[in-house]
């Protein structure tokens, strides 16, 4: 189906963008890479009066390491650029692994890191054409008032399906948000609401401008494991990111650790207790199994995606265990 | 809906086009410029049949607003033939069975030519990986790999000949 | 010197450049001045009666030209004469979500889309059926009134004496297998452009021209004539390039007729191109098939009897259904020697998009069951999987128990070749614990990866010996016209859909005429220009159009030879046409024709390093004819002449040089004389044997296919590049069905109607496929050729299933083998090994109550539920919400 009609705004600066957002709120939708939004607009999931195309804002592109402050990634930096960054590969391997699994090479050329963070939640009852959605009487997330995944409930369970946010959560990333009052920094873990239909605490008049990775997380070993049927193109059906710090090479005790999961809840989630299970232990089968169980407990998959929830939860368990083992066994990254 | 005047650079030439703000690049190419080599295969940005190069980077024309491409150098499959004859990759795809029904082929041409421009001698894994955003339903990709290798060989030979 | 000059060479497709440059035109690439865009309104309900349709608001929208509904084309049609149950647009009922209700023609797709929202349809909802086994129990509200119990067709065949066969068996295996629904997903969405000539005097619509993405231009012409109530002579169907078919374009797809109906109403050209979602609704793919299979064998593995009960979930319309269900039974035979067969096939209607013909039509799912069961029997009797197939080979020439004539039979060699190439003897049953040394195994998977090898065979028809239209007309006819400068134009109705039909035709004609391939121009699939050909389906083109082309070329050759004989002063039998030269046979040895032809021939690099000889441009030919030729004429007798000279000599006699050839399958290959016996017989059968090597992750159930060796008996490989391409493509498509492709349903709603959700494999997970060509030189095929495009597909699914068994010891009886199904089976096995086997109620006994085939969650095939949601309501964007129209919506109740 054709795109709904809209007026296109093409700001060149963040200031201009924020001003335009403020002016046209709430009938305005930001577009960056468009890889998720354009198909959704074809399906009439979004029909804004104005579309704010931020691709022309050059200041939001690029990766910049600042001594003592960590790494800054402009929100418009393409996923391919992040993937190809040697600095990120060496210092933030978990992000490198995660970003390299997003969709396909073509879509990574277009998609942006900011877009991946702000990705709309997904559900087989939601990501469908207007005609299709009519057939099921619509759903609570869009145009309707019932949830087909959890009938009777009044909550939307659409699932967050970004690959990079769990990695970024493991790295204690912050995001910079611009609004009429200037810039603010928000820890990424506070960005998500856990509600399928209001996934993110980003005002309609706000713009996510940068991702900030603390220098203290540099050098952590990291691994991302993704469940998908095809080796490319697919959104994750489950994803697990693990970042751990081991001081003296493989075999010695874990000093710090984070485990996060995606595609099994309405938000990417840090696995509570994973750090406690790991810190102070040298990683072995048993420790990894415990982390796997914790991750599986955190996962609340429902029938929003192709595979059964039981299987996806089981894979969170297996992948978390494997990711912990792989991260501990991976060669020490150099600072 | 009111149309705006756009200036797009396609295959080295500038075109002035009146298009709606919601016009997608694929539609402007196919409908307004008559460049039907860029194909539409899906509606959810998943198949790669409409791949074009934006400043040399392969992207999906079905997912780009035409207006967003102003100021960029757009290359379509119509723009990769060399001096009026087939580019090595085009010839090789024909000779080695890389194209059967041919509907996905323009997309592959754009992806492969971008790959070879950045990496003239890719490994088999790199080839496989870089093609993974373009779907083909006929070939099983196997003969494409042979074609790409043959094109690389042909380029090498051509370069050697030119250097003589 | 090889036997042939053009045949057997790896030759680039004659239309390759149009595809790699983007210059080739597919239906959606075409447009006409004054053309409107058509969009179709689809039913949101799986089963409902249409009380009223009101298009007043849509017609009032600026930019809308016409709205057509069922009453604009009330004549029913269907691809089979016995199944005329479709309407271009629904007349009384809609029968699946996505059924066609109305069509808008407008200035743009966007306006048409908006107009669709303004058409008010008043539906009366009816109970709907989604599971075939439940649908068969229906007592009322049948999907089609004339089909009680929603059974489209059932067949009960017994050949030999099945009861006696089972009585003689020393071991009997019995199980239920399920193959879920898959679809073609050709890369090109269907598109049709229809235009009527207007009578300049009356302004009334006159002749119709339709450009369409079709595999069957003549069937389309026929059905258009039926529905539009126009003579066939007033309809011209042209097939531009087609972006893949696989059977999905092998019958009349609703948009093809709707475009014409809309064009008639709009009095202007109308183009309709499906969205990808509409392609899924148009469907005609491979039905979900439930196979209850029982095989009896002797201790040595020799089959004594087979009994199969097959239920196909056919969707809402007949389509090719009866043919599919017949193929499923008929193609149990002709692969192995099975003395006793009982077959009970049921084609059942459900409220889902219609299934039809898909690559390997009818045979694929049953072959999966059969080859899996062979493997199970081999394991039980401790016979090697290759050996059990060897002991059951046919002994051709023969007629199988169900009346199929088998002449060439390359299966034994196929088996030997894949066994040899894959290292079967060393690997099968021996590599499953070798994952420690597996290069694919990362540290974390080292303990969980298991490798295995599986083998399976398949076969397929080279065209159906009996046409779906009952007539004595030849199945293919080809005309050839030769120009004075030696250009050869071949007119064939055969439909090139990417498989190489045009190239094959050109090769056959060039070989017979002994001229350069570059002289040949193929004009194909234009009903005004080309003689009737039934189309591209059931792998019939090489066998039938190829034979017709061969005969047409021979007719031309005869004329050329006669003329040349006079000039060469020899008898026609002594004239040789080869490599663009016509010469006198010199004793027993042929003179080297290239020598004398040097002046008009040049060499160029052909594919794969070969050197090919081509004629130089036409202009040079003209000059030659004007001067050199004339001079030579006067030179008197000689022993050789160029192809052009010979052509001119022939044209000088007859004024025109043309020839016609046609092909009808031989009477003795047309099958047995019983109800349904017409489906299955073919002039020849292709054979395939495959070995797949896989690894299975025991913790996740993920299956990786590393390599498939596929040996295919294609009779003779007219063009090895094309044959390998077809074999690899078939294996690859089988792999998709084996591992990941599945149409997922919930209450008649297709959950994954797009290429993001329907998981056609990407290059990342596509394995290496080694195609091995086996040539059995069939006596009936052109130069001995048989089919190559479909037969290999069916062996891939069981080869992978058997390899999974070899790797981890679980038998997957439901395709696709998704990781969750594999993991469930693995868990079941672990529970069984602990000694607690529990039968389940679906007929598939999985130990421990774990039944991977139990419909769960989205895969809810079952349930006579007809509609659970709250029902469609108007979208907030719908102008009707903002400005409700009081008139007529909602009917009189």
Image: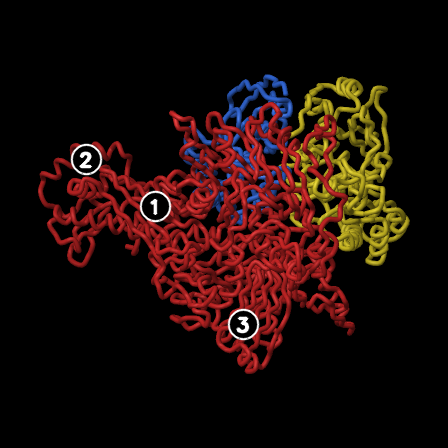
Chain colours: A yellow, B blue, C red
Where is mark 3, residue-wise? Answer: C342
Compared to residue A46, the image places residue A102 above or below, namely below
Assess disc 2: are there few (<14), some (14-19) or many (≥20) residues with their C-alpha within 10 Å of its C-alpha: some
Which dot, 1 or 2, sits closer to the camera?
1
Secondary element at image label 1: loop
Compared to residue C581, the image places residue C716 above or below, namely below
Assess disc 3: are there few (<14), some (14-19) or many (≥20) residues with their C-alpha within 10 Å of its C-alpha: many
Q: Mark 2 — on which chain does it sit?
A: C
Secondary element at image label 3: strand
Compared to residue C441, the image places residue C517 above or below, namely above
Relative image position of residue B56 (x, y in whole percent): 57, 29
Compared to residue C540, the image places residue B8 above or below, namely above
Q: Do labels 3 and 1 share a chain?
A: yes
> Does label 2 or label 3 sit earlier along the sequence?
3
Relative image position of residue C359 (x, y in whole percent): 51, 54
Q: Which residue is drawn at 70% across and 24% down?
A: A53
Where is mark 1, residue-wise? Answer: C531
Where is mark 2, residue-wise? Answer: C625
> Does label 1 or label 2 sit earlier along the sequence?
1
Relative image position of residue C460 (x, y in whole percent): 47, 60
Query: What label sits on residue C243 in the rendered view?
Result: none
- What is the C-alpha distance between the residues marked 3 and 1? 41 Å
Q: Mark 1 — on which chain does it sit?
A: C
Quarter of image, res C278: top right
Task: Mark yes or no: residue A16 visible.
Answer: yes
Closer to the camera in the image, C682 or A119: C682
Q: Which residue is drawn at 62% across and 60% down?
A: C149
| Tag 3–tag 1 contact (CB < 8 Å) | no
Direction from residue A203 to residue C73 in the image, left or right:
left
Relative image position of residue C345 (x, y in whole percent): 56, 65
- What is the C-alpha distance between the residues marked 1 and 2? 31 Å
């Amino acid at each position: 189906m054709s795109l709904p009609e809209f007026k296109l705004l093409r700001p060149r600066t963040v200031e201009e963008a924020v001003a335009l957002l403020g002016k046209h709120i709430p009938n305005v939708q930001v577009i960056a890479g468009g890889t998720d939004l354009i198909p959704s607009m074809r399906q009439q999931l979004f029909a804004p009066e104005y579309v704010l195309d931020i691709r022309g804002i050059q200041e939001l592109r690029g990766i910049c390491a600042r001594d003592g402050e960590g790494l800054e990634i402009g929100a418009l930096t393409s996923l391919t650029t992040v993937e190809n960054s040697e600095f990120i590969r060496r210092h933030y391997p978990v992000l490198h692994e995660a970003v390299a699994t997003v969709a396909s090479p073509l879509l990574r050329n277009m998609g942006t890191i900011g877009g991946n963070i702000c990705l709309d939640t997904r559900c087989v009852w939601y990501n469908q054409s207007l005609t299709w959605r009519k057939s099921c009487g619509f759903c609570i997330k869009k145009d309707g008032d019932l949830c087909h995944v959890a009938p009777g409930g009044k909550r939307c369970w659409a699932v967050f399906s970004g690959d990079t946010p769990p990695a970024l959560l493991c790295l204690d990333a912050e995001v910079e948000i611009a609004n009429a009052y200037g810039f603010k920094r928000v820890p990424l873990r506070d960005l998500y609401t856990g509600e399928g239909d209001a996934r993110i605490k980003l005002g309609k008049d706000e713009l996510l401008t940068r991702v900030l990775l603390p220098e203290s997380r540099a050098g952590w070993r990291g691994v991302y494991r993704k469940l998908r049927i095809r080796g490319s193109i697919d959104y994750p059906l489950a994803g697990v990111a693990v970042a751990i710090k081991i001081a003296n090479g493989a075999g010695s005790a874990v000093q710090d650790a984070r485990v996060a999961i995606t595609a099994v809840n309405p938000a990417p989630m840090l696995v509570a207790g994973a750090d406690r299970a790991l810190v102070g232990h040298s990683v072995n089968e048993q420790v990894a199994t415990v982390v796997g169980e914790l991750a599986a407990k955190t996962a609340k998959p429902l029938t929003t995606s192709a595979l059964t929830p039981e299987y996806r939860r089981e894979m969170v368990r297996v992948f978390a265990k494997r990711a912990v083992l792989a991260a501990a066994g991976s060669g020490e990254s150099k600072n | 809906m009111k149309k705006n005047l756009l200036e797009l650079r396609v295959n080295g030439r500038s075109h002035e086009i009146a298009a709606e703000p919601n016009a997608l690049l694929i539609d402007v190419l196919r409908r307004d410029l008559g460049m039907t080599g860029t194909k539409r295969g899906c509606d959810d940005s998943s198949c790669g049949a409409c791949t074009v190069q934006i400043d040399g980077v392969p992207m999906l024309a079905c997912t780009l607003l035409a207006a967003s491409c102003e100021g960029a150098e757009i290359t379509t499959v119509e723009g990769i033939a060399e001096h009026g004859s087939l580019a090595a990759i085009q010839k090789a795809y024909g000779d080695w069975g890389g194209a059967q029904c041919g509907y996905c082929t323009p997309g592959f041409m754009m992806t492969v030519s971008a790959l070879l421009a950045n990496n003239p001698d890719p490994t088999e894994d790199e080839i496989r990986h870089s093609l993974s955003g373009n779907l083909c339903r006929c070939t099983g990709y196997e003969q494409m790999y042979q074609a790409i290798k043959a094109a690389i060989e042909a380029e090498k030979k051509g370069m050697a000949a030119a250097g003589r | 010197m090889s036997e042939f000059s053009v045949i057997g060479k790896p030759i680039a497709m004659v239309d390759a450049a149009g595809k790699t440059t983007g210059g080739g035109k597919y239906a959606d690439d075409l447009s006409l001045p004054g053309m409107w865009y058509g969009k179709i309104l689809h039913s949101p309900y799986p089963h409902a009666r249409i009380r009223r349709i009101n298009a007043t608001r849509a017609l009032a929208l600026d930019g809308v030209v016409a709205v057509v509904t069922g009453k604009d084309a009330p004549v029913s049609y269907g691809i089979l004469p016995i199944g005329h149950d479709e309407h271009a647009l629904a007349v009384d009922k809609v029968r699946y979500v996505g059924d066609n209700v109305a069509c808008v023609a407008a200035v743009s797709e966007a306006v048409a889309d908006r107009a669709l929202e303004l058409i008010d349809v008043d539906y009366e909802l009816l109970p709907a059926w989604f599971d075939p086994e439940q649908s068969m129990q229906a007592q009322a509200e049948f999907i089609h009134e004339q089909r009680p119990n929603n059974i489209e067709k059932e067949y009960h065949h017994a050949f030999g004496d099945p009861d006696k066969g089972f009585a003689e068996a020393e071991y009997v295996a019995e199980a239920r297998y399920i193959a879920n629904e898959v679809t073609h997903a050709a890369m090109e969405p269907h598109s049709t452009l229809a235009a009527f000539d207007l009578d300049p005097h009356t302004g009334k619509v006159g002749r119709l021209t339709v450009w369409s993405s079709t595999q069957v231009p003549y069937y389309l012409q026929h059905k258009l004539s039926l529905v539009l109530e126009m003579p066939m002579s007033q309809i011209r169907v042209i097939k531009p390039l087609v972006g893949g078919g696989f059977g999905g374009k092998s019958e009349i797809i609703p948009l093809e007729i709707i475009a014409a109906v809309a064009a008639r109403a709009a009095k202007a050209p109308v183009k309709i191109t499906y969205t990808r979602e509409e392609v899924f609704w148009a469907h005609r793919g491979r039905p979900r098939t439930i196979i209850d299979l029982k095989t009896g064998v002797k201790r040595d593995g020799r089959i004594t009897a087979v009994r199969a009960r097959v239920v196909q979930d056919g969707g809402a319309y007949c389509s090719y259904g009866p043919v599919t269900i017949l193929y499923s039974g008929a193609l149990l035979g002709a692969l192995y020697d099975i003395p006793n067969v009982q077959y009970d096939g049921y084609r059942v209607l459900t409220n889902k998009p219609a299934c039809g013909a898909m690559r390997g039509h009818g045979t694929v799912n049953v072959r999966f069951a059969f080859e899996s069961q062979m493997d199970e029997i081999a394991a039980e009797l401790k016979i090697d999987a290759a050996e059990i197939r060897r002991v059951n080979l046919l002994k051709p020439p023969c007629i199988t128990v169900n009346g199929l004539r088998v002449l060439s039979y390359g299966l034994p060699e196929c088996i030997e070749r894949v066994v040899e190439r894959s290292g079967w003897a060393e690997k099968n049953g021996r590599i499953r614990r070798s994952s420690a040394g597996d290069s694919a195994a990362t540290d974390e998977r080292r303990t969980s990866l298991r490798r295995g090898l599986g083998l399976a065979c398949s076969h397929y028809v080279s065209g159906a010996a009996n046409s779906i239209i009952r007539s004595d007309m030849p199945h293919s006819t080809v005309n050839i016209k030769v120009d004075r400068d030696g250009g050869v134009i071949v007119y064939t109705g055969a439909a090139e859909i990417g498989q190489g039909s045009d190239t094959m035709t050109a090769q056959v004609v060039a070989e017979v005429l002994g001229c350069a391939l570059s002289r040949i121009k193929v004009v194909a699939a234009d009903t005004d220009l080309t003689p009737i050909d039934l189309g591209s389906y059931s792998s019939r083109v090489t066998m039938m159009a190829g034979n017709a082309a061969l005969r047409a070329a021979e007719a031309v050759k005869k004329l050329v030879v006669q003329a040349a004989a006079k000039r060469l002063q020899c008898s026609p039998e002594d004239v040789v046409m080869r490599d663009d030269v016509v010469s006198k046979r010199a004793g027993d040895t042929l003179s080297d024709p290239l020598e004398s032809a040097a002046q008009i021939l040049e060499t160029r690099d052909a594919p794969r390093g070969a050197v090919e000889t081509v004629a130089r441009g036409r202009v040079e030919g003209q000059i030659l004819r004007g001067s050199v030729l004339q001079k030579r004429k006067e030179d008197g007798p000689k022993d050789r002449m160029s192809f052009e000279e010979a052509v001119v000599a022939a044209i000088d006699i007859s004024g025109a040089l043309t020839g016609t050839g046609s092909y009808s399958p031989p009477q003795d290959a047309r099958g047995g004389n019983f109800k349904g016996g017409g489906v299955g017989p073919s002039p020849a059968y292709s054979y395939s044997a495959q070995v797949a090597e896989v690894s299975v992750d025991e913790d996740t159930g993920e299956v990786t296919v590393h390599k498939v060796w596929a040996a295919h008996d294609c009779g003779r490989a007219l063009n090895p590049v094309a044959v390998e391409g077809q074999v690899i493509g078939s294996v690859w498509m089988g792999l998709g069905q084996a591992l990941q492709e599945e149409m997922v349903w919930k209450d008649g709603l297709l959950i994954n109607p797009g290429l993001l959700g329907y998981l056609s494999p990407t290059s990342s997970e596509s394995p290496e496929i080694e195609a091995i060509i086996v040539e059995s030189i069939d006596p009936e095929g052109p130069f001995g050729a048989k089919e190559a495009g479909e037969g290999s597909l069916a062996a891939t699914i069981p080869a992978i299933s058997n390899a999974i068994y070899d790797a981890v010891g679980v038998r997957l009886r439901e395709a696709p083998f998704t990781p969750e199904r594999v993991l469930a089976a693995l868990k079941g096995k672990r529970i069984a090994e602990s000694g607690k086997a529990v039968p389940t109620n679906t007929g598939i006994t999985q130990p421990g109550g774990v039944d991977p085939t139990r419909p769960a969650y989205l895969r809810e095939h079952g349930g006579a539920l007809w509609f659970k949601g709250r029902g469609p309501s108007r979208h907030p964007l719908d102008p009707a919400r903002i400005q409700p129209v009081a008139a007529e919506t909602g009917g009189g109740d």
